[in-house]
Amino acid sequence: MEAHTYVGQAVKALLTYPLCDRCLGRLFALVGYGLSNKDRGKALKTLILMELHNRISNGDRGALELFTRLAPNMGDIAKPLYKKLVGKELEVKECYICGGKLDELISKFSTKISEVLEEGGFKSFLIGVKKDSELIRREEEVANTVRIPTWESVRNELRREIGKKVMNETSIPVDFTNPHVIIHIDVDKDSIELIIPSLMILGRYWKFGRYISQSKWVMRNGRKKYKLSVTEVLENLSESFKSTNVSLHASGREDVDVRVFGNGRPFVIEFRKPLVKEADLSKLEEYVNDVTPWLKFRLERFCGRRVIKELKSNEARKSKVYRALIYVDKPLSEDDIEYICSFFKGRVIEQRTPLRVLHRKKDILRRRSVREVKGILIDPHIAEFLIHAEGGLYIKELLHGDKGRTRPSFAEVLGCDVKVLELDVVWVS
């Protein structure tokens, strides 16, 4: 048998390792169409036996010697010919990879998973198999030894065969993109773990009041610091999805005393371990907007985790427009307002971590640009500005200077103290 043929490669493998039909066939999984690995393995063993029987019948003693070496590693299929040619019963060896238990594993896990899916009322599923197991280590040893390039992992076979049996037994479909539940199989521990993927909704929120935090703020005494938070309002949707908890992922975070107008702030609300995966977003939006008049929400679409990464990434490249109302302790003129607008247009600001957040953030120097400033003088001590700035620039510190930690600042350029009376976000890119 020529070594470069599939039969020759199968002989090479069986001379080294005892293999069941499935584990032998899996070495050739990438060739042949519409065949199971069990079919492939049985077919290869059958061809080997036919070829050897023919050669032995024609007096080839080398073929008989090869057969007696191969037969214990081939399993029950070789027993009749062995008894005919050798005159005694063949003692077969256990499959080196699975111990002859792969069919049993597939049947056992299929039954267990089917029961769990039906009891839990799940609408779709996906099978996963833990990587680190003795079964997989043995298979990789065989694959590395025999060097047959057409093999597939036993993990693939388990996922496929168990998935097919579960679908046949329950009529619950496999979903490769958005499964209701992912079931991880641990072969060594003979156990399964249910992982219910999070459900995520992309949206935007508006804040019409001040002292509304983005996340729930609980003090050491267990009391809430602020009566209302964006996350708490969105948590009202948790019951609709029967989820265990909720997380808010937003594109930046405004201070609690800052309102949000314009196009709103983008966010993703994540519902963990939801038992319900479908809902009418328009009805949920209507429901959550009835909770309080101080917050408004738009729920745009269901999304994946990639959208969260997009929200969080490149924050500095994004820009925001703010409305700031300030008080200065010296009289201002229209010329002062005009100078501020001209001076800060395109200006790069050097800003150390603000004193007010230094207790929770590393003290670093960041450079961010102000793109444009427009302002009006309301009275000699009060002015209003629209500030278009790069994401990541602390606007309050841009205005009052933060004791020289932000330069240049409005206070430095005006040569007087600046007090921020109001600050609002009016646009988020």
Image (cartoon, grey):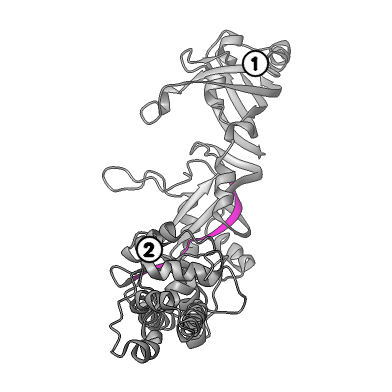
Q: Secondary structure at mark 1?
A: loop
Q: Secondary structure at mark 2?
A: helix
Closer-to-camera residue (262/251): 251
- Looking at the image, the residue that sits furthest to the front is 59
Residue 212 appears at what percent x and percent y? Answer: 48, 44
Q: Is residue 242 visible?
A: no
- Looking at the image, the residue that sits furthest to the top is 415
Which quadrant of the rendered structure holds the C terminus?
Answer: top right
Q: Amino acid at mark 2?
A: Ile
Seen at 50% across and 67% down, the residue is: 9
Circle 2 crowding by C-alpha within 10 Å: few under 14, some 14–19, many from 20: some
The vertical placement of 222 against 78, above or below, is above
Residue 40 appears at what percent x and percent y? Answer: 52, 78
Q: Amino acid at mark 1?
A: Pro
Query: What secondary structure prevails in the magenta region?
Result: strand
Foreground tag (2 vs 1):
2
What is the C-alpha distance between the residues marked 2 and 1? 78 Å
Question: Which quadrant of the structure image shows residue 278?
Answer: bottom right
Seen at 63% across and 17% down, the residue is: 348
The vertical placement of 313 against 362, above or below, is below
Does the magenta run of residues contain 196? Answer: yes
The residue at which mark 2 appears reads as 136
The vertical placement of 41 against 184, above or below, is below
The residue at which mark 1 appears reads as 380
Closer-to-camera residue (320/185): 185
Question: Which quadrant of the structure image shows residue 359?
Answer: top left
Question: Which quadrant of the structure image shows residue 15?
Answer: bottom left
Circle 1 crowding by C-alpha within 10 Å: few under 14, some 14–19, many from 20: some
Look at the image and give the residue range highlighted in magenta.
Answer: 192-206
With 249 as the anchor, is 74 left or right in this view? Answer: left
Seen at 54% across and 27% down, the residue is: 394
Does the magenta run of residues contain 58? Answer: no
